[in-house]
Image: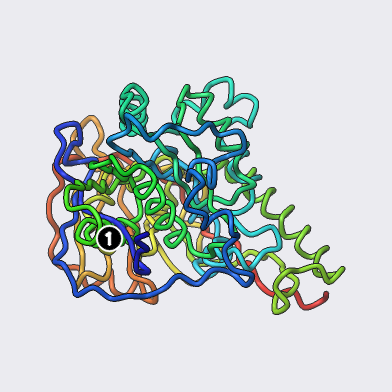
Amino acid sequence: MYRPTNSLPAVPRRNPKYSQSAYKVVKHKPRKQQHHHSHPKPGGIPPELTDPTISPLIKYGLPDTPDVPVEGIDCIHIYDFDNTLFISPPPNYELYTSQSIEMLQNPSTIHSGGWWQDTRFIRAIGRGWDTEREAAWEGWWNEDIVELVRDSMANPRALTVLLTGRGLHFGPTIAEICASKGLKFDAIILKNPAFPRTLDFKTNVITDLLEWYRGVNDISVYEDRVWHQRKFKKFLIEYQQAMRKSLRYNVVLVVGLVKFLDPEVEIALLKQSIEEHNNAYSQRLLQYPNNHGLAMIDVHLFTGYVLKSQSRADLLNAYARLIPAAVRDTLKFHANAIVIRYIKASAKKTAHLKYGATYRWVATHFGQFNDEIWAVKVAPVVDETGNAAFQPLVETPMVILAHKKRTNGSYVASKIEEWIPLDSCVEIVTQVGDWNSKKIKKRQDL
């Protein structure tokens, strides 16, 4: 049986259904093959997951997943869940410091597993679980991918699989979300805890599917993460060369959309999660011995024209695709404000700022510096006379979209000199105020 190196998947064949604006194919030169090995958690992979006589749908699928006979299956369609099929909200970058975002997304920081391992965050989407279920989570789907899933479902010769890095305890939640939309997969596969890395787990599943369904000569993978897309490409190239020359592979890089939870709901859930973490710490129940009690405090970052949540999403959805896809996974995305001043000042010194006042702007230019930072220049909307509706309090109003980690965004942004006019000019709404981010820190009194 072929076993992959410690890397993954492939480049997509062009399909007329995929628009250039929504999807991007990243081509890479073949590199010399290197052999590595996955490192499962202590105790090893359970024997049933390595048994070649058991169908991979039974091995990995949700309980009661029916097997699909080998005969008649000649193509496999694999869909990722988060930000590929479903618009899963990440931690709201408007609410936290950068370090706190990293802590939230690290499964080893908070006792519940953090943002992507705690079901309470995805179950709090929109207007609440029961209301959203009745509405089939309208507005939270990538409808282009939903259409492709329906096409796969209608093809009797296609094996349609939802493959996600979410933990096994997300099974009922994800199954219910998909069922509400009428999406019926041959298998919904969630990451087995024996595999610490999502990449390794998905590679093993894809390998087992190809080994079991030996009549398959066409496989398509839909993925939103650039790093995974590259690795899937490499893996399928290796598999084709070593095992199945006739195999055609298609890995589509899906550009995800951005939506967030209601900020008040999100903060309340995080406070609840931290309280549970601290209780576990007090009882010495934390699974990671180096962990400690946590506290969440407010930190003043700057005063500025703060974008409304919808305006931030509009900017990112419109212009984030202008940033090279190859570096997106390495960036910090912002699009949160037009900064007026960074230093906290007294009420007397800031009286002229008109705290709470609302101002409307329009994006006019896109710029970047040295592939380190990307920003959008904005201008006040014009009134009925054709003049600017107000006079900005900053010389060059701009919104930083993203920058590389460990880059001083405000300093590097000032170096942008070349601005390219935008064809589509998104309008944004801002409100003057202080930007106070939540910071998660070690608690000293526990």
Near-viewer residue (103 or 11):
11
User: Which residue: 42% across, 53% down?
Assistant: 305
Q: Where in the figure is residue 227, as x and y percent of width and height?
A: 33, 62
Above or below: residue 138 compared with residue 311: above
Q: Where in the figure is residue 374, as x and y percent of width and height?
A: 26, 62
User: Which residue: 73% across, 69% down?
Assistant: 287
User: Which residue: 37% across, 69% down?
Assistant: 6
Near-viewer residue (7 or 280):
7
User: Which residue: 50% across, 51% down?
Assistant: 90
Q: Where in the figure is residue 326, as x and y percent of width and height?
A: 25, 62
Above or below: residue 324 compared with residue 299: above
In the drawing, does residue 201 fall left or right of residue 249?
A: right
| Residue designated by label 1 | 230
User: Residue reaching furthest front?
Assistant: 53
Q: Is residue 437 visible?
A: no
In the drawing, does residue 351 fall left or right of residue 169?
A: left
Q: Is residue 216 visible?
A: yes
Q: Amino acid at mark 1?
A: Arg
Please, what secondary structure does the residue beneath circle 1 have? helix
Quadrant where the N terminus sits is: bottom left
Near-viewer residue (264 or 300):
264
Quadrant where the C terminus sits is: bottom right
Q: Quadrant of residue 279?
A: bottom right
Number of numbered discs on residues: 1
Protein image colouring: rainbow
